[in-house]
Image (tube, rainbow, N blue to C red):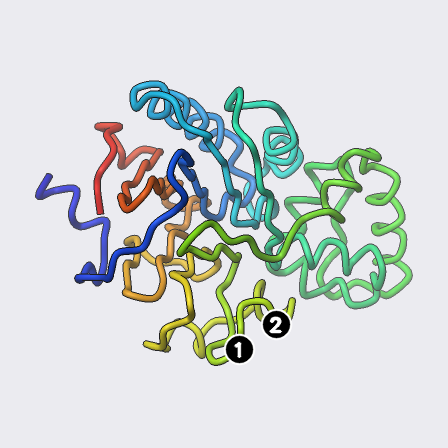
Amino acid sequence: MQQMKRWFAGKSGHSIVTVPAGRRIYAIGDIHGRDDLLREMHRRIAEDAGARGWANNILIYLGDYIDRAPGSREVLALAMGDQPHGFAKVCLRGNHEAALLDFLRHPENGGAWIAMGGNAALQSFGVSPPSEFAAPETMARAAAQLAKALTPAEHQFLHDLKYGHREGGYFFAHAGIRPGVDLEAQEEDDLIWIRAPFLESAADHGAVVVHGHSVRREVEVRPNRIGIDTGAYYTNRLTCLVLEVNKRWLLQTGATAANPIAVEI
């Protein structure tokens, strides 16, 4: 257990925060095309849920399914599928999915998405990626090819992704929230892009915010937020936060998780 504690940063006392009785929440951080790790995580989630007995299990994806690693399309298929079996699912939007959709609408601005890993997503869908400095007409051709390559189900999935979700005393969003703004009044761009104003805030947000987006070597536990983006793309460590009543624990996957045990936080 002492060795496992290095995974967590800033662990401190917190007031009792709960999810509704009878519900067990599994929240998965940024995946970025690592379908291999997501398959492994699905197995560990199923094993964890089976060992703990009956509950209404809810799987929440925090967004950033795509880009960087080669398996963007495969990750979408897994998120759209029926595994783990019997789980309700909530699929949130990350800034990378927003960037893909923006590329389809405004390909002339696609260089930024290509540079932040969209080239890998394009290849995953069978589209030859242009340079991030390509001419507008070249970007437009790639966007048209991507639009044609996406299946109707993939289009629908990407367009239907939610920006936020609440369960009891927890609020889930890809990047975080704007401090001082009611959760119900948050701007969509903040929910998928915000960093410093949220990360540096010690304010009570009205719920503990569970988020990804900002990579850390260790899971960050603060009184007002829990950050679970542990950089799966390059660390091989995908993180899942599990919440049940007033308990919290982690499942992690990849090369550094040689002993696949749940660790309470």
Residue 189 placed where, x, y %?
A: 63, 69
Q: Which residue is mark 2?
A: 185
CA distance separating discs 2 and 1: 6 Å
Q: Residues within 10 Å of mark 1 (few under 14, many from 20)?
A: few
Residue under the image location 11 percent in, 39 percent down: 1
Q: Which residue is mark 1?
A: 181
> At 41% across and 43% down in the image, what residue appears?
20
Residue at 8% x, 43% y is 2
Q: Residue furthest front?
A: 21
Q: So how many labels did they put on this image?
A: 2
Q: Residue at x 37, y 57 (%)?
A: 227
Residue at the farthest left position: 2
Q: Residues within 10 Å of mark 2 (few under 14, many from 20)?
A: few
Q: Secondary structure at mark 2?
A: helix
Above-or-below relation of 26 to 13: above
Residues 126 and 200: in front is: 200
Along the horizontal axis of the image, is 25 left or right of 131? left
Instruction: Look at the numbered discs 2 and 1 and tell me whether their residues touch, using CB distance below 8 Å.
Output: yes
Kind of residue indicated by mark 2: Ala
Residue 128 x, y percent position in the rendering: 77, 43
Q: Position of residue 226 (x, y in %)?
A: 35, 57
SS for dot 1: loop
Q: Position of residue 202 (x, y in %)?
A: 32, 76
Q: Is residue 76 left or right of residue 5?
A: right
